[in-house]
């Protein structure tokens, strides 16, 4: 995530801000520019003009009334929803105790996912007829998962205590709302970037044959545990359950890596930029990690960064920031994810990307 500054006073602001805490200016996220925008009140109530450009009026997404969204939309849009909230198919019953707070947390995580997808240049709607669009069901007492483009997240995943209980139950080193969303979005993009793009043969060489019985594979995994050699082949234990889960886990880790490197660069805390002993001096230039970096350069930046962040977490008495060790075969899979994303961007946008 890049840094944002108030366009009026240059004070540091955050992705979720609706106003600058220094000068009090109204702010909102503009998905068309992927920037935080300065808002000037328009003549109509609850309508604004974008301070940095001429044009029509904008308003906040209707979910701003619940403090669940700060994204902007064209005024009088018939949906009443921003591009991210328009992906919601189901939200929790907000009349039930605790659901508004849980939904806010889920929306915050989802907005970060959607931001990453837009930075990568990925479509939120499949160009293939019948595939539909990425969609979300946030419901209580549901099984977290993906089916036909719809990501379902149980509301209880927004409860930190319940999430930790589930993490320990499944012996997971990491469990977070954003991690769930990144993983499940991978299933949606498998169809777009692998199956529809004619990449299944290459996929099978790396991940295995996805035609293996999926339900039987998951039942076996939950009954017998992961493969004994999973640490030498996969990015996580769950990735060894089935090729589709291997892809989704690898996809999630790729998004972890890209967003972490992007954020570290924005904050000026990348170890290589400080000339630490385990990395050469990093050129003092800004790059769009989502579009400009080759996979080799990305991983050369990620390895020392994750090691440094793990050390920082440990010195504060916390668990590792990134509690995973990526084996060599998993790097090849991450490279494949990188390549199919860049290939999609070149095909649909005509951009030059590594």
Image (cartoon, helix red, strand yellow):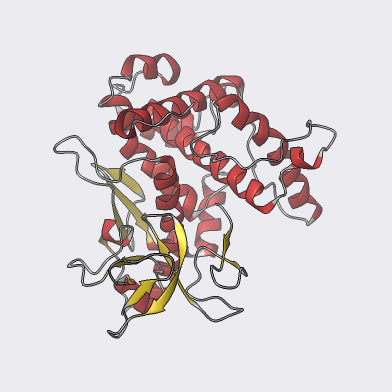
Which of these two is toward me, 139 or 308?
Answer: 308
Residue 232 in the figure: left or right of residue 119: right
- Looking at the rendered structure, the number of numbered marks drawn on it comes to 0
When asked about the image quadrant of residue 184, the answer is top left
When asked about the image quadrant of residue 330, the answer is top right
Task: Say above or below: 164 vs 274.
Answer: below
Outermost residue toward the left?
Answer: 130
Which of these two is toward me, 83 or 325?
Answer: 83
Task: Say above or below: 310 vs 283.
Answer: below
Res 326 visible: no
Residue 122 image position (x, y, % from top left)? 36, 40
When asked about the image quadrant of residue 6, the answer is bottom right
**At 78% across and 57% down in the image, what residue appears?**
316
Task: Say above or below: 336 vs 308.
Answer: above
Residue 252 image position (x, y, % from top left)? 47, 40
Which of these two is toward me, 104 or 167?
Answer: 104
**At 64% across and 43% down in the image, what residue appears?**
322
Which of these two is toward me, 265 or 244?
Answer: 265
**At 62% across and 28% down in the image, what residue appears?**
297
Residue 229 image position (x, y, % from top left)? 57, 21
Res 127 visible: yes
Outermost residue toward the right?
Answer: 277
Residue 44 in the figure: left or right of residue 217: left
Residue 205 image position (x, y, % from top left)? 41, 13
Residue 133 in the figure: left or right of residue 290: left
Outermost residue toward the front?
Answer: 54
């Amino acid at each position: 995530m890049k840094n944002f500054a108030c366009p009026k006073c240059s004070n540091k602001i955050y992705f979720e801000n609706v106003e600058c805490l220094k000068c009090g200016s109204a702010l909102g996220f503009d998905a068309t520019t992927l920037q935080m925008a300065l808002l000037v009140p328009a003549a109509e109530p609850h309508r604004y003009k974008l301070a940095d450009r001429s044009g029509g009026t904008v308003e906040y997404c209707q979910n701003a009334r619940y403090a669940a969204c700060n994204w902007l939309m064209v005024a009088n849009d018939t949906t009443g929803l921003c591009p991210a909230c328009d992906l919601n198919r189901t939200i929790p019953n907000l009349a039930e105790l605790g659901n508004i707070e849980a939904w806010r947390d889920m929306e915050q995580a989802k907005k970060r996912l959607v931001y990453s997808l837009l930075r990568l240049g990925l479509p939120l709607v499949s160009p293939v007829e019948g595939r539909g669009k990425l969609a979300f069901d946030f419901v209580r007492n549901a099984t977290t998962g993906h089916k036909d483009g719809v990501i379902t997240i149980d509301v209880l995943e927004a409860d930190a205590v319940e999430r930790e209980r589930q993490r320990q139950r499944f012996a997971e080193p990491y469990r977070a709302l954003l991690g769930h969303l990144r993983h499940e979005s991978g299933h949606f993009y498998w169809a777009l970037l692998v199956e529809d793009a004619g990449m299944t043969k290459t996929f099978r060489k790396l991940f295995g044959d996805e035609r293996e019985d999926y339900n039987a594979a998951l039942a076996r995994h939950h009954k017998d545990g992961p493969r004994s050699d999973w640490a030498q082949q996969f990015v996580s234990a769950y990735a060894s359950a089935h090729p589709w889960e291997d892809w989704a886990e690898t996809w999630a880790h790729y998004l972890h890596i890209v967003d972490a490197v992007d954020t570290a660069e924005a904050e000026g805390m990348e170890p290589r930029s400080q000339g630490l002993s385990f990395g050469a001096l990093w050129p003092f230039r800004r790059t769009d990690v989502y579009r400009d970096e080759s996979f080799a350069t990305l991983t050369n930046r990620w390895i020392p960064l994750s090691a440094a962040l793990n050390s920082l977490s440990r010195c504060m008495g916390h668990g590792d920031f990134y509690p995973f060790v990526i084996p060599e075969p998993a790097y090849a899979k991450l490279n494949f994810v990188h390549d199919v994303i860049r290939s999609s961007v070149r095909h649909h946008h005509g951009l030059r990307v590594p």
